[in-house]
Image (tube, grey):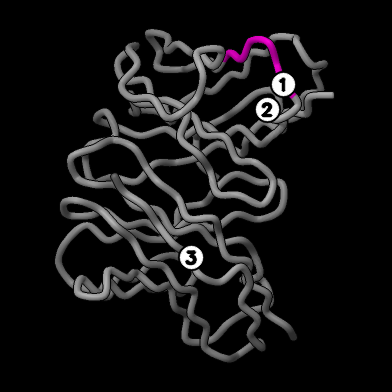
Amino acid sequence: ETGVTQSPTHLIKTRGQQVTLRCSSQSGHNTVSWYQQALGQGPQFIFQYYREEENGRGNFPPRFSGLQFPNYSSELNVNALELDDSALYLCASSFGGGRDNTEAFFGQGTRLTVV
Amino acid sequence: AQSVAQPEDQVNVAEGNPLTVKCTYSVSGNPYLFWYVQYPNRGLQFLLKYITGDNLVKGSYGFEAEFNKSQTSFHLKKPSALVSDSALYFCAVRDKGYSTLTFGKGTMLLVSP
């Protein structure tokens, strides 16, 4: 098991609501990346936080936002939920802004269902 | 831009036989290449990576992968498959100039007893 923990593990929300997902990074890591994995698809990069600042963003709308705290844990916030937001959300912990040659370690994910 | 292709949705192999899961990639510079495995209702587990050096990379659980620059491929292999290897396998690439990891769509490996 990695030292990356995500909460909650499962969540059901209604369309239009807002949701916050949380991730604690592995000890010694200062970079957190968030991915969305829709059913039957590979993970898609949402954004990355490095030293409390956004360090890259994928093709996701502004209603997907996040932040990183001084202890390098992170939150993913999604506003105005849509049915298509239903997916497994994965947090990945790494070091050095993701630009070094070390691998990222993933949490177990949060399964979000929007009804 | 960087991309990964996993041409097989599913690979079937009998226990004890060798297995190969295919991956090809596209990057503008030199790639970092990774294989991850996902078991049902779980996150991704790191298997192995290619950074530089030997083209044959050894990883966890007896898996290995061969980097072929001319064919832009990074196929995952194992000499003798186990039923417990049945899972979803993802190939991923990162251009050395970027921080973003790009994944393939995944290949389901089914190992029959």
**SS assignment at label 2:** helix
Point out which mark residue A85 bears. Answer: 2
Quarter of the picture containing the N terminus of chain B is top left
| Residue under the image location 32 percent in, 12 percent down | A53
Residue topped by disc 1: A82
* Pointer 2 with pointer 1, Cβ within 8 A: yes
Residue topped by disc 3: B6
- The answer for which chain carries disc 1 is A
Nearest the eye: A111 or B6: B6
Q: Amino acid at mark 1?
A: Glu
- Rendered view: B14 above or below B37: below
Where is residue A56 drawn, in percent x and y? 33, 24
Q: Amino acid at mark 2?
A: Asp
* Neighbours of disc 1 within 10 Å: few (<14), some (14-19), many (20+): some
* Neighbours of disc 3 within 10 Å: few (<14), some (14-19), many (20+): many
* Neighbours of disc 2 within 10 Å: few (<14), some (14-19), many (20+): some
